[in-house]
Amino acid sequence: MQDSGNEEMGWSAQSGVGVVAAGGQAAVEAGIEILSSGGTAADAAAATILALTITDHLLCSIGGEVPLIAYDSRKKEVEVLSGQGRAPLSQAAIDWYMKNGIPGGGDIKMAPVPSVVDLCVTALIRHGTKTFEEIVAPTLLLLDSGTEDWHPALASTLRKLVEQEQHGNGSREENLKAASDRFYGRNAYRDDIATDLEAFYVEKGGFLRKRDLAAHVTLVEAPVTIDYKGYTVCKCGPWTQGPSLCQALRLLEHYDLRAMGHFSADYVHVVIEAIKLAMADRDEYYGDPEFVDVPLAELLSDEYSEIRRPLIDMRRASLEVRPGDPLGMAPLKGGGVIRPGSGGTTTCVVADRWGNVVTATPSANVNADFVDGGRAGVTYGNRLLSLNTTPGHPNCIEAGKRPRITLTPTLVLKDGEPILAMSVAGADLQDQTSLNLLLNFVEFSMLPDRAVTAPRFATAHLQDSFDPAPERTEAFMKAGSLRVAASVDANVRKELARRGHQISVSEPPISSPVMLYIDQEKRTLYAAGDPKAGRHAAGL
């Protein structure tokens, strides 16, 4: 679907009142509309997220997922909302996956429980002031003017939620919950939507059922945090790849990156080597902490960072996969593995006039050849592919388990106040790009408009998070790879190649970021999204 609305909207914005940066233009307009009517950052984010399921469909959908980080200016607190659906509760389904693998290619068995509706409602209850009716209005306008077969069905489903909210006799929060309960068929509320969804899953050969929908809840969690040179970096937990950014920063904190120079060979080399070490631990240890004991405190500790840092050789690129041993406090687990190598998501950051900030990363990876939402119009995604079928692995599929996803919003504080928010689309590239942006700001004083358009670099020296192969070495992509923007100096590329990096040059943008900066002294908000990646930003 093509975006509608003001064709003048650009990719960067400045305001003292409120800003939104995201993917589709009409979705940014939805968020701005809510801010202009007095809504909070959470209200605007919920409106933007719902609209993105239309403007950025195939990248995200109402049946997808949205991890979200919110800063509450009244409580001076940061919290994570786990907008991630789970695997089916049926053990028979899990046995099928373990025997047959987790299918892709549009097979509905790859779909987790839809999480977007409950995520938006939870954000509104905890941090918003608006009703569901108000925040869904821009999305309904998009659906009513749309042309896809599933648009009328989804519009009908969303109007049922508005109807449930309007008929409630409780508080705003109670009526919001009633709307979500109707979608998921919980408690005494009507289960017509859940009935339609179950019929769709059965028809398509999926395993999800009403009890999976009814069991869904948006967990509220504390962020994972580290300090980096006076900044507090906040990430979602190890059910995402988010803590890998924290691990990379811990490895880099004792290097004088500024003295190396932006995009010097030394700078690119040391950052990419830190990413390789962090990603090796990600692939070895991360998983849903409700099911596995992730040694996160050890992975982020001073001692572990200090024993891992010497593994970075400034003279040559590593071609090894080198997870460490955080429990035994050893720099390497085993001797390393040499493995020669052989998406879809969108973005959302919002800040309001009261100092509230939200960053979220909506996704679904909808298969364009299998866009079918059934009677409910709820198209599905593929996130169960981010689990695997390796017995004993922390990310092995289990009944009701969250996949370890790539979606990874970032919030950064300075002296307890929010200063940066980032959201990136790009699968395994997301935290690598977030690291590029964060260092652009912290080390090289770039505001969002420069930070999101500066050259970027990334590696595929890691496991593909969408390859559920039971033999995890088969999921490893390309040892020593280093992808750099085409604008990087040829002499720098030559030196990096001399050190052993397998260089490839990228003309298209490496991932799709949006970024928000808050100047607390001037009370000014700056937002930008990479225009080459189709990002948009606007301010009041």
Image (cartoon, grey):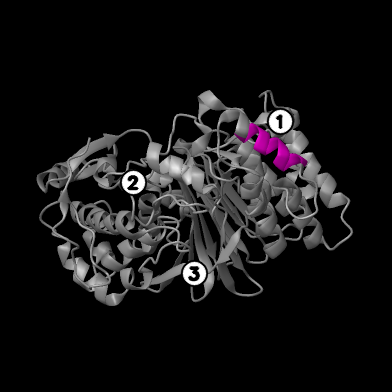
- Residue 540 can be seen, yes or no: no
User: Residue 471 vs residue 296: left or right?
Assistant: left
Q: Nearer the viewer, residue 235 or 417?
A: 235
Contact between labelled residues 3 and 1, with CB atoms less than 8 Å apart: no
Residue pointed to by mark 3? 413
Is 198 one of the magenta-colored residues?
Answer: yes
Q: Residues within 10 Å of mark 1 (few under 14, many from 20)?
A: some
User: Residue 509 vs residue 540: left or right?
Assistant: left
For discs 1 and 3, the disc positioned in front in the rendered view: 1
Residue name at image x 64 percent, y 32 percent:
200
Residue name at image x 59 percent, y 58 percent:
358
Indicate the position of residue 320 as horizontal and vertical percent values.
Answer: 16, 51
Residue pointed to by mark 2? 456
Q: Secondary structure at mark 1?
A: helix
Q: Nearer the viewer, residue 480 or 12?
A: 480
Residue pointed to by mark 1? 375
Q: Earlier in the sequence, mark 1 or mark 2?
A: 1
**Stretch in magenta:** 192-201
In the rendered view, would you say 492 is above or below 533? Answer: below
Tell me which corner region of the image, top left, top right, bottom left or bottom right, holds residue 355: bottom right
Q: Amino acid at mark 2?
A: Arg
- Cα–Cα span, label 1 and label 2: 43 Å
Q: Nearer the viewer, residue 247 or 256?
A: 247
Q: Amino acid at mark 1?
A: Arg
Q: Earlier in the sequence, mark 2 or mark 3?
A: 3
- Cα–Cα span, label 2 and label 3: 23 Å
Q: How many marks?
A: 3
Q: Amino acid at mark 3?
A: Leu
Q: Earlier in the sequence, mark 1 or mark 3?
A: 1
- Where does the N terminus fall, quadrant-wise? top right
In the rendered view, would you say 147 is above or below 435? Answer: above
